[in-house]
């Protein structure tokens, strides 16, 4: 969706499936860019997930960021939903050739298809937890919280995953965030 019209991007299945809605008015940034913020409408995930987009003067997306509460990512049950929105976000924002370049990471986080939530009924209410490889990829180590930051060059864009601590001191999942950002070079 990078480079596409904002209206087209937010009319995509990704936004409908996760019930993403604006949570505040767009804001003007520097260089004629605009910021747009979205969150799930449902109360359970509303404060755990944010999708931030930046658009240029022609309202074409130049930057997309998925922000996840670290405790949500690490939650024993709800972590499957965090993996689902992560995989879905990456499929939404990246073209096929870039998805192929990060296919190992998508497998590591347990990409079970378009939406893992669809499998819940067939699994007696239990969400599958992916088996971590002995040597996780750099992207997966950051997603797991083991490493702080990683950047991956793709075709004309950058994928960056970063862990952000809300305070100094030891890592505390209940206060930390993970950002998965894709932006044009």
Image (cartoon, rainbow, N blue to C red):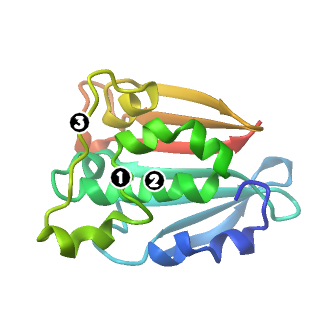
| Identity of the residue drawn at 30% across and 48% down | 73
| Helix, strand or loop status at disc 3 | loop
Distance (Cα) linking label 3 and label 2: 24 Å
Whether residue 179 can be seen here:
yes
**Other-residue count near label 3 (Cα within 10 Å), few / some / many at <14 / 14–19 / ≥20:** some
Tell me whether circle 2 and circle 1 mark residues in contact (CB < 8 Å).
yes
Q: Which residue is mark 1?
A: 83
Looking at the picture, how far across and down is residue 131, in whole percent?
Answer: 23, 39
Looking at the picture, how far across and down is residue 30, in whole percent?
Answer: 80, 48
Q: Which residue is mark 2?
A: 87
Q: Which residue is mark 3?
A: 172
Looking at the picture, how far across and down is residue 56, in whole percent?
Answer: 82, 56
Looking at the picture, how far across and down is residue 76, in whole percent?
Answer: 15, 51
Q: Is residue 141 left or right of residue 28?
A: left
Q: Is residue 58 left or right of residue 136?
A: right
Whether residue 19 can be seen here:
no
Q: Is residue 79 above or below residue 153?
A: below
Q: Earlier in the sequence, mark 3 or mark 2?
A: 2
**Other-residue count near label 1 (Cα within 10 Å), few / some / many at <14 / 14–19 / ≥20:** many
| Identity of the residue drawn at 88% across and 63% down | 58
Farthest residue, direction left: 124
């Amino acid at each position: 969706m990078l480079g596409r019209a904002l209206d087209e991007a937010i009319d995509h299945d990704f936004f409908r499936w996760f019930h993403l809605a604006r949570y505040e008015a767009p804001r003007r940034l520097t260089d004629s860019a605009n910021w747009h913020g979205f969150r799930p409408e449902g109360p359970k995930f509303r404060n755990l997930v944010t999708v931030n987009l930046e658009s240029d003067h022609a309202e074409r997306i130049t930057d997309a960021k998925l922000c996840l509460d670290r405790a949500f990512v690490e939650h024993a049950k709800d972590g499957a939903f965090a993996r689902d929105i992560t995989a879905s976000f990456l499929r939404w924002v990246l073209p096929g050739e870039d998805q192929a370049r990060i296919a190992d990471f998508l497998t590591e986080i347990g990409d079970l298809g378009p939406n893992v939530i669809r499998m819940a009924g067939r699994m007696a209410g239990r969400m599958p937890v992916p088996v971590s490889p002995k040597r996780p990829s750099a992207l997966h180590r950051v997603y797991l919280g083991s490493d702080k930051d990683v950047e991956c060059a793709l075709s004309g864009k950058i994928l960056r995953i970063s862990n952000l601590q809300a305070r100094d001191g030891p890592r505390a999942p209940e206060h930390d965030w993970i950002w998965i950002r894709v932006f044009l070079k």
